[in-house]
Every structure is written in C-alpha cells, then in structure tokens.
C-alpha cells in the first residue's frame, strides 16, 4: 500500500510554494487581463505608406492617446489595384468576402483584407449644413477604380499565382504589387466608433491611406459586468458542489468535511492555474474562466473517486484509522486517476498541437488544471481531511515552533 | 446472451443508424426547425467560427419611466431586427442583455462601419421649416446658421401636430432620377400624414422644406407645388440612400442607443481555419485515446473504444438535432468530453479487473464491477453537470455564445457518456459473457492466475 498521507506536510509545502509564488507575482506585476475584463480598445492599423513607430506614437499622443501601447507587426501583403467592385459598401463587403473565400479555398491559408482609399465612405460626419456639405462629404466616397485592396496571406504565395487566380475569378486587368506593409497593434483606453472614424481620418491626413485590420472595443461597464458574473459563477459552482457532496457522503460521519476538502482541493487547482498564468504573464480572458469552471468540475470528480472508496462498507467497517483508510483509497484509485488524466491530457495535447492558435491559452489552462487536479486529488484533498480530523490546523501555531525545536 | 441484452443491443444499433443519418444527411431535421446552416458540417456556427461582429448597445432609458423601459427595449430590438434583415445579414441574432442592453451578432460581416451606423441611429425623421423675419429673410443664429422649427399642421382631430416619420408607410425605396441617374429615396405618407404634408407644402411653396434625420439636415428641397401623399429625398449618395430607405421602413427607435459599448470582430477566414484545425485535433485525440484504451485495457478497452465511436456519432447527431450552435470552445468541449467519457469506462474496468483478479467469473465480475463503480460514476457525472449548468447560466446572462456553447457541448457529452458507459459498454461486455473470450483472462489485461482479494494487499 502506498503511503501518501503521512507525507502530507511536504505536499502542502509544495503547493503552498507555488501558490505563494503566484501571489508574489500577482502583487509585483499584476494579472495580464484581456480586453474583456480590463476594458479598452485594441486595433491593428495597416498603413499603405511607410510609418515609423515613433512617429505613430507621437501622433497618437497628439490625438490624445498618450496611453496607447503600440507594437509593430509587419505584414507581407499584396496590393491589388483595379478590381471591379461595387461602390455600394454593403455589396462591396459581400464581393470582398466572396473573393477572400475563393482565394482561401484555392491557396488553403488564411487571408485578411484591408481597403485603402475608402475612408469615411459611409460616415458622413458633417452633414449638418445643407445639401452641399452632405454631397461633398460623401462624394469622396471610394470609387472602386481608385481603391487599393491589401490582401494578407497566411503563407507565402507567388504573385503570378494570385494574378492567374484573380483572372479565373473574373477580375481581369488588375495590378498586383507584393510588398511589406507597416502594421501596428495598438491598445488604448475605450474608443467609440465615432472616435475611431476621427482617428482614421486624422491618420490618413498625416500618414496616407490606412485601414483597421481588426478593431475591438469594450467599455468599462461591459467588462465590469463580466467580472461580476464570472465571480458569481465560481461561487455558485462551489456552493452547489459542496451541497451535493454533503448529500453523497451523508452516510459517513461529518459529510460536510468531505465537501469542504473537495472544494479546498479544487480551489487549490484554480490557484495553481492562476499562479501559472500570472507568473508567465499569459492573458486572462473569458476562455480562462471557462477553463476554471471546467477544472472545478473535473477536480471534484477526481476527489470524489478517491473519497468514494472511503464510503464502501468494507472500508467503513474496518478498524483502520482515517489515515490508513485514506491511503487505501488513494492506492486503489491511483491507476484510474492517472489513466483518466492521461486520456484527457492526450485529447488536450491534440487540441494544443492541432487546434489553432486562438485556443492555445485556453488549452494550456486546461492542461495545467488537469495536472493540478490529479495531483491535488491524490496529495491534497484526502490529506486535508486527515489533517482536519487530527486537529492539525488547530495545532498549527503550536506545531510550527515544535518543529523548530526538533530540528 | 439473454434476450434482454439482445433487445438493448438492437436499440443501440438503431440509435447508431439514426445518429449516422442525422450527421450525414445534409438537411436533416432539427427540433427547432429551419436549416441549421450552410457550412460543410451542416451545423449552426457561432460567431467565432463563422466570423463576424458582436455589438453591444445600451438603451438610454433616462428619458422614459421605469414601467415602459422593458417595452422600449423590446421595441428597439424589433426595429433593429427589421433594419438588419433589410440590410441583408442572414442569421443575425439580436438579443436583450441584462435590463437595458442589446447584443447584436452579425455573422459573416467583416466591415461593420455601415452596420453600426444603421443599427445605432435613432432614425427620427422630422420635417422642419425656416423662420423668417419681417423682411422675409431667414433668421439665423449667432454663427450664421438658419433657424429651423418643426413644420406643423392640423390633423384630422383638429390638433396642430408636427409632421414626423411616424406617418410614413413602410415602403420607402431608392430610385434613380432618369436623366442624371442620381439616386433618391421615394417615400409615401399614410392618409393622416398626407393631410399634414399637403397643408405644409401648400404653405411653403417657393420656400425650402428641411428634412432632418436625428437632428441632422439630410435634404432641403425648395417646395415647387402642393403635394399630398408622396415625396422624394434627393441629392443623397447611394450608400446613404440605401441606409435611409432601410431606416425609414424599419421605423424610429423608441429610445436612443448608447454605444456600441462592446464591439468585437472575428475574421471569417480565421473561423474557417479554426474549424479545420479543430476537426484534425478531434480526430487525432480520438485515435490516441482509442490506442491507449486498447493497449492498456485490451478487450474491454476495444469494447469501450467501440462505445466511444458510437458516442461520438450520437453527439454529432444531437448537435444537429437540437441544434447546438457550434463554437470553438464548444468543439474543445466536445473533444474534451471524449477524454472524460473514457473516465466512466476506466472506473468500471478498474473495478472489473479487481473482481476478475479475485477469481470471479466474467458474468459475476461485470455485474459487481458495474454496481461497485456506479456511485462514483454517478457522483462524478452529477458534479460535472452542475458546473456545466452554472457555466451555461452565466453564458446566457452575458449573451456569451462561447460559454454557452462550451457548457452545452460538455454537458451533453457528460450526460451521453453516462449512457455510453452504463448502457452501451455494459451491454457489449455482457454479450461476451458465456463465449470463449470470457475465460481468456489476458484479454482483460490480467496475466496472473486468479488470486484472492487479500493477496492484493501483499503486492
């Protein structure tokens, strides 16, 4: 029989160290909160002409965004001119989407698209004074002939291949230039859509044609709401599981203690996940919360399987003390715990390797959580129960000095 | 091999055939009706897979009372739905979030500037006239802009009321002027509006009539003759003409909207890429799990793998039947559930092995093994479902399809895995009882001859 219980101090110490390291990192550098929780705006700006990062930073500050975090991310692109596209934006959007879909199927890669020379085509912000102004403001509307599309491919493609493919799709007489465009990932405080249009107008006047490859904005109100609901969710899940466990182990003495220890083990898993994300500065977003709630369910499952052995009649009727019974439970379930975690980890690693970059952090959180919960079900949950029954926690303050005297 | 097992076996086969049919037939039925989606999987896709934009608006309820707030938000949702439909976005969803927010999800729409202008406009159409001084010159304010006041007329019940967009028929459309081919928006009033419009145009012959949308002057034609039911708004670029027609036909919002307070876009091409990659990940995951199960648990592992594949087919069938909106976390949840579905089998097989090691025959070992494993299997599934329900609840409160999708797929997966382990695997193994393989212990991963359960303690 394995003895996992008597070594519990070392297990507690190991977990404690990781969690304390996480807390120190949290105090020192804080949580790397995603847009959803921190609010603000992220946008990828793509410029047709060369723009220095310093110039962009200075100009953004002039526009009142001195807080902007700007990262350079050059894009290899094809500038395509002379496409016969509709002047009506909704139709043009559909045409461009169709074009991208076709090219993507043909070249089997991701393609992003930007328009140069279409600024303010629908946002006639200055229509207050009469027909003339209205007319002028929107007569600058992109006529498709002088608009340039930037196509950004996920992998290298020969210009001649693109040219012939465009011909096949019915776009003839187009000119294609392969080039590297200056692109910047910019994060600022929350920007409204109207402000976005102003920024685009100002940047185009200063630096020439530009477009936003993507634009995401979340107001503090929305992010606050998300944080609140996610905290509710974790509390609600903990309470519901605690109550269920108290019911499931009702035949044992003090069933609530089993539930409390299961929840403590699960909180341990969550803290380990947080510690890893804080220490490695990985972004925390909604997906991370999904991962946490999944691990809450998965972790409790692991603990239940171990505790399940303690409620079996042959164990209950045995004369062994709780520590021995706990060791029996752990010994009997260790194969299952490791095998289940292995099968889950196999699928998670498959997801990590093949599932695309958008879910990397999510899958990583789950991998950390699965490892932590397997460990805690074998090395923390039962040990906490034994410590509680032995009164270790009450003795903690006496216990520490005693240990020092011994050593 | 008794009759009951055969009946259950037949039932499983029928389920499998139905599941396969649901998965493979492109336009298979769903409970909610309608076509689940046009993509290769024939499934309804969430924004993160189809690509598109999510917008959240807040209704400005400061001007209206508490009791009418709910109906105002509902009215706004109806009008936004009409606008989005007219704009031509298919499968858009417009939902209430909390008490005063509206979530608009536009799948496939990449460039949303136009959509944002369309959705966020209050679209209050007003007709105004100039104020003239004693010399007949228009009065201007300090900065030289002319002063416009609402044009009013006497309605059928004898009251003086302003002429607004509420009197329009919902049939405004874009037309092109014959000679110049310039776009214009033609509109028509109902009978009450026509009464008002004819009085106003009669009064303003030779003078400009101001047409305002949300306090912005969009046209100020000079009235040439008294007109009744219909009119046109000229000098308007095509983009705006289309939007204006949509706005006039959908009607004005009962409350102004603030925002969008959230705006996130997923590039549709990224979504398509994610589907492809996730499918590969799912396949690889499934194969690796099957290999692991067969290598470690031998025959029962192979049986569980068969159950797992049936489980996968039934899951996909359920996704289409319900239908579940598939999201990236949803796919991850499904793939994760494959790993977790194995858990119930692992729990049962560990018990089965214990019983076989204790020298019991397969028939007895299956029954005791399943019964011993049951409380743990039940409790683990219930707690997993509890966290799925809570995730789903939070997801729906936040109108967050990624959370709902994950909770739903994982929840269905957990429930189905219970069925798979307890019904499918057990029936398959029961069918083996009494055959030759039942006595072949190495096939069950047991190399040693039968020993007593006490012997295990001494290992």
Image (tube, coloured by chain):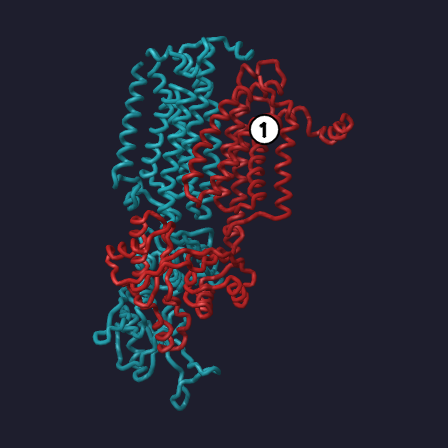
Q: Colour of chain B?
A: cyan
Residue reaching furthest left? B178
Of residue A323 and residue B296, the one placed in the foreground of this image is B296
Residue at left offset 37%, top offset 10%: B439
**In the picture shown, does residue A248 fall above or below A17?**
above
B141 in relation to A389, above or below: below
Q: Residue at x 39, y 88 (%)?
A: B137
Image-quadrant location for residue A323: top right
Closer-to-camera residue (A139/B392): A139
Residue closer to the observer: B390 or A89: A89
Task: Give how far across and how far down residue B220 sits, in percent.
Answer: 34, 78
> Which quarter of the rendering shows the C terminus of chain A?
top right
Quarter of the image for residue B253 reads: bottom left
Note whether residue B191 is visible: no
Callout 1: chain: A
The answer to whether residue B131 is visible is yes
The residue carrying mark 1 is A381
**Residue farthest to the right?**
A405
Name the spot of residue B312 as percent of width and height, x first.
35, 32
Q: Residue at x 40, y 64 (%)?
A: B122
Seen from the viewer's position, the closer of residues A393 and A373 is A373
Give residue B242's position: percent from left, percent from top: 30, 65
Q: What x and y, as percent, mark residue B212? A: 37, 72
Q: Quadrant of the N terminus of chain A?
A: top right
- Position of A8 with respect to B187 (left or right) is right
Image side of residue A74 versus residue B89, left or right: right
Q: Residue at x 43, y 85 (%)?
A: B139
Which class describes the residues within 10 Å of circle 1: few (<14), some (14-19), or many (20+)? many
Q: Which chain is red?
A: A
Dot 1 falls on a residue whose secondary structure is helix
**In the displayed structure, does residue A292 sit left or right of residue B284?**
right
Which of the 4 image quadrants contains residue A131?
Answer: bottom left
């Amino acid at each position: 029989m394995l003895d996992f219980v008597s070594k519990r101090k070392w297990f507690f110490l190991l977990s404690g160290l990781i969690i304390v390291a996480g807390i120190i990192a949290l105090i020192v550098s804080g949580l790397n909160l995603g847009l959803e929780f921190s609010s603000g705006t992220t946008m990828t700006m793509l410029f047709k002409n060369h723009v220095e990062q310093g110039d962009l930073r200075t100009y953004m500050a002039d526009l009142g965004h001195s807080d902007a975090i700007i990262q350079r991310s050059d894009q290899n692109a094809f500038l395509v001119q002379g496409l016969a596209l509709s002047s009506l934006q909704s139709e043009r959007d559909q045409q461009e989407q169709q074009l991208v879909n076709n090219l993507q199927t043909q070249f089997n890669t991701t393609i992003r698209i930007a328009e140069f020379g279409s600024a303010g085509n629908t946002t006639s912000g200055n229509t207050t004074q009469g027909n003339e102004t209205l007319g002028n403001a929107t007569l600058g509307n992109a006529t498709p002939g002088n608009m340039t599309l930037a196509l950004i491919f996920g992998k290298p493609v020969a210009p001649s291949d693109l040219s012939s493919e465009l011909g096949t799709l019915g776009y003839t007489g187009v000119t294609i230039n392969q080039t590297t465009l200056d692109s910047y990932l910019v994060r600022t405080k929350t920007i409204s859509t109207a402000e976005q249009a102003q920024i685009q107008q100002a940047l185009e006047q200063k630096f020439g044609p530009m477009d936003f490859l993507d634009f995401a904005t979340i107001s503090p109100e929305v992010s606050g709401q998300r944080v609140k609901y996610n905290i509710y969710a974790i509390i609600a899940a903990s309470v519901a599981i605690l109550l269920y466990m108290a019911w499931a182990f009702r035949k044992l003495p003090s069933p609530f203690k089993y539930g409390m220890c299961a929840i403590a083990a699960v909180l341990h898993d969550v803290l380990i996940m947080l510690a890893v994300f804080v220490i490695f500065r990985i972004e925390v977003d909604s997906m991370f919360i999904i991962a946490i709630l999944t691990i809450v369910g998965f972790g409790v499952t692991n603990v239940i399987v171990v505790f399940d052995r303690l409620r079996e009649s042959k164990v209950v009727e045995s004369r062994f003390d709780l520590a021995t019974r706990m060791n029996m439970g752990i010994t009997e379930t260790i194969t299952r715990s490791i095998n289940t975690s292995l099968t889950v980890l196999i699928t998670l690693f498959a997801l990590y390797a093949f599932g695309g970059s958008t879910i990397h952090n999510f899958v990583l959180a789950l991998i950390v959580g699965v490892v932590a919960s397997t460990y805690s079900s074998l090395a923390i949950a039962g040990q906490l129960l034994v410590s509680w029954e032995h009164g270790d926690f009450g003795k903690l303050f006496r216990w520490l000095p005693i240990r020092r005297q011994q050593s | 091999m008794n009759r009951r097992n055969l009946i259950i076996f037949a039932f499983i086969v029928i389920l499998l055939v139905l599941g396969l049919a649901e998965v493979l037939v492109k336009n298979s039925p769903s409970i909610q009706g309608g076509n689940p989606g046009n993509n290769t999987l024939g499934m309804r896709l969430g924004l993160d897979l189809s690509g598109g934009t999510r917008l959240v608006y807040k209704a400005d309820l400061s001007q209206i009372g508490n009791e009418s707030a709910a109906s105002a938000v509902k009215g706004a949702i109806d009008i936004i739905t009409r606008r989005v439909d007219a704009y031509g976005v298919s499968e858009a969803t417009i939902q209430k979030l909390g008490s005063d927010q509206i979530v608009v999800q536009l799948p496939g729409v990449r460039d949303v500037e136009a959509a944002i202008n369309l959705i966020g406009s209050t679209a209050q159409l007003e007709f105004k006239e100039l104020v003239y001084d004693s010399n007949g010159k228009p009065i201007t304010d300090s900065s030289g802009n002319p002063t416009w006041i609402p044009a009013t007329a006497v309605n059928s019940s004898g009251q003086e009321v302003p002429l607004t967009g509420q009197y329009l028929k919902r049939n405004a459309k874009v037309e092109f002027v014959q000679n110049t081919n310039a776009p214009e928006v033609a509109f028509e009033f109902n009978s009450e509006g026509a009464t008002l419009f004819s009085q106003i145009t009669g009064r303003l012959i030779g003078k400009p009539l101001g047409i305002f949308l949300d306090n912005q002057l969009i046209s100020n034609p000079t009235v040439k003759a008294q007109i009744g039911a219909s009119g046109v708004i000229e000098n308007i670029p095509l983009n705006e003409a289309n939007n204006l027609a949509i706005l006039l036909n959908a009607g004005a919002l009962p409350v102004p909207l603030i925002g969008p307070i959230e705006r996130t876009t997923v590039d549709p091409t990224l979504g398509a890429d994610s589907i492809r990659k996730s499918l590969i990940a799912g396949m690889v995951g499934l194969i690796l799990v099957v290999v692991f199960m067969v290598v470690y648990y031998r025959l029962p592992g192979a049986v569980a793998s068969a159950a797992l594949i049936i489980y996968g087919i039934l899951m996909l069938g359920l996704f289409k039947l319900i239908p579940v909106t598939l999201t990236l976390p949803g796919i991850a949840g499904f793939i994760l559930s494959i790993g977790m579905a194995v858990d119930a089998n692992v729990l049962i097989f560990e018990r089965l092995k214990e019983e076989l090691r204790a020298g019991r025959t397969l028939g007895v070992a299956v029954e005791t093994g399943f019964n011993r494993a049951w409380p743990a299997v039940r409790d683990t599934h219930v707690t997993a479902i509890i966290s799925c329900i809570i995730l789903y609840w939070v997801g729906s409160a936040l109108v967050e399809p990624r959370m709902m999708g994950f909770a739903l797929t994982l929840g269905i997966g957990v429930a189905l895995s219970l069925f798979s382990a307890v019904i499918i695997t057990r029936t398959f193994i029961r069918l083996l009882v009494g055959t030759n393989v039942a006595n072949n212990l190495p096939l069950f991963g047991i190399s040693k001859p039968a020993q007593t359960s006490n012997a295990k303690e001494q290992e």
